[in-house]
Amino acid sequence: MLVLGRKINQSIQIGDDIEIKIISIEGEQVKIGIHAPKSIDIHRKEIYLDIQKENDEAAQMPENFLELLFQNKQDS
Amino acid sequence: MQVETKYAGEIVVEENQIIHFPHGLPGFQEEHRFLLMDLPDGGLFYVLQSVETTGLAFVVAIPYSIKKDYSVDLDDATQEILQIEKPEDVAIYGIVTVKDPFSKSTINLKAPLIINIKERLGKQQILNTDEYATKTPIMEGDA
């Protein structure tokens, strides 16, 4: 991992069209501004990981899910 | 073309039935082509089947059938990527995490699937809100 020191209002340029700027620092909280093409999705890491985990779990569907669904319909 | 599916065996589909996910799904970035399939007696539930990977299929549902006041704010980037011109072109699904018994299943309303049905383009959009959970119970969505 590349580690760079930056001050408020300084930026990092990634490739031709991504800019990451340090907007403010308050205690442990850092505000970051990001300029990037619309085609690039930007998410807080923990939320992205959460979605990934949920997709993984959803993909591990019980083999008998059709039966489960059918049973559910009969019960309701 | 023929597609081998997880739950319905081999089926024949037209190329224009395939929905393209240019960026895949989080955790499945390499999966770009899916089929949306009806289930026999599926009711509110459908299956999103990967065209390339037989073993990869998701149960999905229309969120409004579970949470009536569900709303999604489509950002400009999503509209652009999916080439959305009119609201009528958009279909929204939530991925269901199936549990045994089925009534304990949950639906992911935090990251819905946005599909342009006209252009057959799809994306899982992670919503910028804490209002909806990744694990919303399917049975008490309106509670």
Image (cartoon, rainbow, N blue to C red):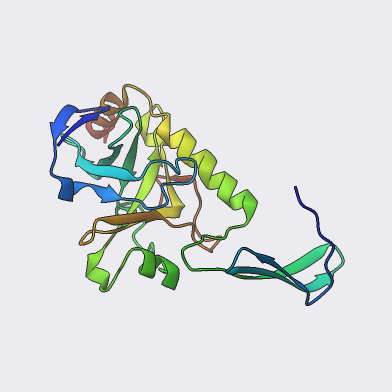
Q: Is residue B47 above or below residue A61?
A: below
Residue B54, picture quadrant: top left
Residue situated furthest right in the rendering: A27
Would you say A27 lies left or right of B76 here?
right
Residue situated furthest bottom in the rendering: A9
The image position of residue B123, as x and y in percent, is 38, 55
Residue B75 makes an appearance in the image: no
Q: B4 or B101: nearer the eye?
A: B4
Name the residue: 30% across, 51% down: B20
Q: Is residue B141 above or below residue B4?
A: below
The image position of residue A9, as x and y in percent, is 78, 77
Name the residue: 83% across, 67% down: A6
Specify the quadrant that holds the N terminus of chain B.
top left
Q: A65 or B65: nearer the eye?
A: A65
Name the residue: 27% across, 27% down: B6
Q: A70 or A74: nearer the eye?
A: A70
Residue A67 makes an appearance in the image: yes
Q: B102 or B118: nearer the eye?
A: B118
The image position of residue B88, as x and y in percent, is 22, 69
Residue B58, picture quadrant: top left
Would you say A21 lies left or right of B25 here?
right
- How many numbered marks does the figure carry? 0
Residue situated furthest top in the rendering: A63
Residue B138, picture quadrant: top left
